[in-house]
């Protein structure tokens, strides 16, 4: 049994490529016949093929009979991290979307897992609150340290793009809740998002991609529900 595509792991006990031991990576493929999976090394932006036994998380190795239980635990932990604005979980998902991943890890749905709602809740507050204030409000118990929080809100827009692209039914919910984001990004005079000019600049390209994708599906009729908006 391999690790789920999109899962963030660390590498261990590599003999060839020992320089990558301890490095974080995102699983990119199912196991091959030889039991190897392609993983994207986050820091190096390089793809390597690694045996499943050479990967681990803080919960331990992925092993056959307990695989489904571990998957459930990892999924819940991963969603909770994104809900609280964790940089690692959020960025790994955004990286997977940008690299062309067609589905979520752990066979989850953007909407039923709560991921879409959590991301929209952040973005709906972009007009009147700073990023640091919002992240502090969801981490009053300090479960996510300051240096581990999302630094660039464009990752949330990348997640909306992934949801809209791979689960067309999410488009209606996005359209119903994306008003504050659209208002900020279309204000070419102030150019402020989360009270920051820098965040506006960081988000303009992924925002344009999101809107282009939504309009494209509406015009082509691939999502009939969206055509009402």
Image (cartoon, rainbow, N blue to C red):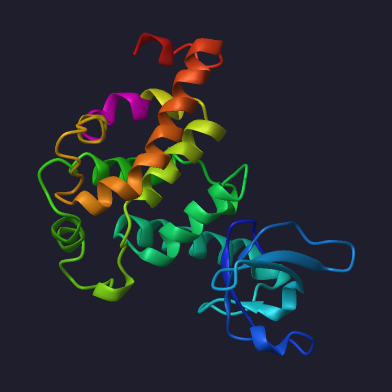
Q: Quadrant of residue 206?
A: top left
Stretch in magenta:
173-181
Percent position of residue 181, x then y: 25, 35
29 with respect to 149 (left or right): right
- In this view, which residue lies farthest toward the front? 189
Magenta residues: mostly which secondary structure? helix
State the residue in front, 183 or 58: 183
Q: Quadrant of the N terminus?
A: bottom right
- Whether residue 128 is visible: yes
178 with respect to 67 (left or right): left
Picture residue at 53% right of the left edge, 59% below the top: 72
Percent position of residue 97, x then y: 54, 47
State the residue in front, 174 or 4: 174
Picture residue at 42% right of the left edge, 10% below the top: 227
Q: Is residue 224 magenta?
A: no
Q: Quadrant of the C terminus?
A: top left
26 with respect to 196 (left or right): right
Q: Does residue 199 lie above or below 151 as drawn?
A: above
Percent position of residue 113, x then y: 44, 45
Q: Does residue 50 lie above or below 132 as drawn?
A: below
- In this view, which residue lies farthest toward the left? 128
Q: Does residue 157 lie above or below 44 as drawn?
A: above
State the residue in front, 58 or 88: 88
Picture residue at 53% right of the left edge, 32% below the top: 165
- Whether residue 2 is visible: no
Picture residue at 26% right of the left edge, 45% below the top: 200
Q: Is residue 177 magenta?
A: yes
69 with respect to 130 (left or right): right
């Amino acid at each position: 049994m391999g690790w789920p595509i999109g899962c963030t792991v660390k590498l261990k006990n590599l003999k060839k490529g020992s320089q990558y031991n301890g490095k974080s990576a995102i699983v990119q493929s199912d196991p091959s016949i030889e039991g190897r999976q392609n993983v994207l090394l986050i820091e190096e932006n390089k793809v390597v093929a690694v045996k499943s036994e050479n990967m681990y998380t803080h919960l331990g190795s992925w092993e056959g009979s307990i695989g489904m239980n571990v998957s459930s635990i990892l999924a819940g932990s991963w969603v909770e991290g994104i809900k609280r604005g964790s940089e690692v979980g959020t960025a790994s998902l955004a990286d997977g979307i940008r690299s062309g991943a067609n589905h979520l890890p752990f066979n989850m749905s953007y909407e039923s897992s709560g991921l879409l709602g959590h991301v929209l809740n952040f973005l709906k507050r972009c007009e009147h609150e700073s990023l640091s204030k919002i992240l502090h409000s969801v981490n009053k118990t300090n479960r996510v340290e300051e240096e581990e929080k999302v630094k660039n809100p464009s990752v949330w827009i990348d997640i909306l793009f992934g949801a809209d692209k791979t689960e067309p039914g999410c488009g209606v919910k996005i359209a119903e809740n994306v008003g504050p984001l659209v208002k900020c990004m279309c204000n070419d005079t102030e150019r402020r998002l989360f009270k920051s000019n820098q965040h506006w600049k960081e988000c303009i390209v992924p925002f344009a991609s999101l809107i282009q994708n939504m309009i494209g599906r509406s015009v082509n009729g691939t999502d009939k529900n969206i055509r009402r908006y």
